[in-house]
Image (cartoon, helix red, strand yellow):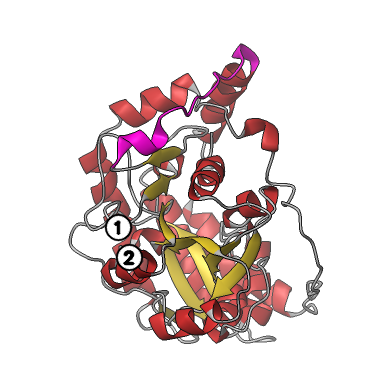
Amino acid sequence: MHGRYALAEAYRLAGVDRNSAFLAPAYHCVTMLDPALALEGEVHLYPLRADLAPDPVALDKVLGTVRKPVKALLATHYFGIAQDFTTLRQWCAERDIVLIEDCSHVLFTEQFQASGTGSHGRFVVSSPYKFFACDDGGLLHSADARLLDGLATESAPLSDELRGLKRVLEGSRSPTLTTSDIASIDRQLVSLSAKPVVPGKDAITERSVPSSCYSAALTARASLRSSRFVVAHSPLNDNILRRRANYDRWVESLASVPNCHALFPVLPRDCAPYMFPLHIDHPDPHFYWLKHLGVPIWRWDEMADSGCPIAREYRLHLLHLPCHQALTEDQMTWMTTAVARTLQHVAGAVP
């Protein structure tokens, strides 16, 4: 199971269906909306502030435009940074809306819950596999266990268990990097900048069904046994320390680099970061060059359209950079060097 299928159960238990509406943050991954679309719920997006916190005033405005009864609201702790949803919880309670707390980006398991998370929502959903060396893992939690009575999952077939083990083994074979790889970055940038940037196709399409990332057949599928074993037996403290060190390495390496800034330059004391979010000023050509250099970066450039200026800005400008615990010193050095030099590079420049 992945977090998206835990979300599907949370939405269903909250009453999301074809006769109701659902509120989701304007900045999102499509898999956050897929389960609501699978239930035929009417999705409405609410604006966020620059720090990705919900805006209560904007929420009231959005709610005033919805004609169907709103059954649930999804609120997300982005990138491992816990948000304070105390006011939001009260806002939902006063309107009889079920608050679903999205902990997919925070370390939230049966053995460990990140400080400040998991205590606001009637339902809490997390994706432990994002923090461990396993192939899957989604968790649905409620402080009132009775709300989950009757939920049942089915075990994955042996073939899926074996494929999961195979993918874990393949993923553990990380590429070896050397000083020559770092030395070649400038040469590659000169070559890339001498060629025209091929723009991506930016288009709006209408759809009322889930994306190809969602499979209704997997809604009740339990996590792989190997994934549950890894999550239960991984060294949490060591993993957290390594993630924090890699996150701080990003902050320090890019602090004086132009054309960018860290969205959260200071980690809360007890935070286990999921990714390092970096805002870049010029997606074209810098994002294009970084992808061609092979830097493992992500961004949520496929999302539902909304009037939220922050979501529109972050869609192309906010990069998600890895800080997971398995990264080696050489890998971190190569990535931070590649990003720093790319963001400083000007088309046609020769170092």
Q: Where in the figure is residue 15, as x and y percent of width and height?
A: 54, 50
Q: How many marks?
A: 2
Q: Quadrant of residue 29?
A: bottom right
Residue drawn 79% across and 61% down?
Answer: 207
Q: Which residue is mark 1?
A: 120
Q: Is residue 153 magenta?
A: yes
Q: Which residue is mark 2?
A: 89
Residue at the top extreme of this rendering: 158
Residue 26: in sight, yes or no?
no
First reached walking from the N terminus: tag 1 or tag 2: 2
Q: Where in the figure is residue 64, as x and y percent of width and height?
A: 54, 81
Q: Are marks 1 and 2 in contact (CB under 8 Å)?
A: yes
Residue at the left extreme of this rendering: 269
Please give the range of residues in magenta: 144-159
Secondary structure state at the residue bearing disc 2: helix
Residue 54 vertical placement versus 235 (above, below) = below
State how far apart marks 1 and 2 are (Cα): 6 Å
Secondary structure state at the residue bearing disc 1: loop
Main SS of the magenta part reads: loop
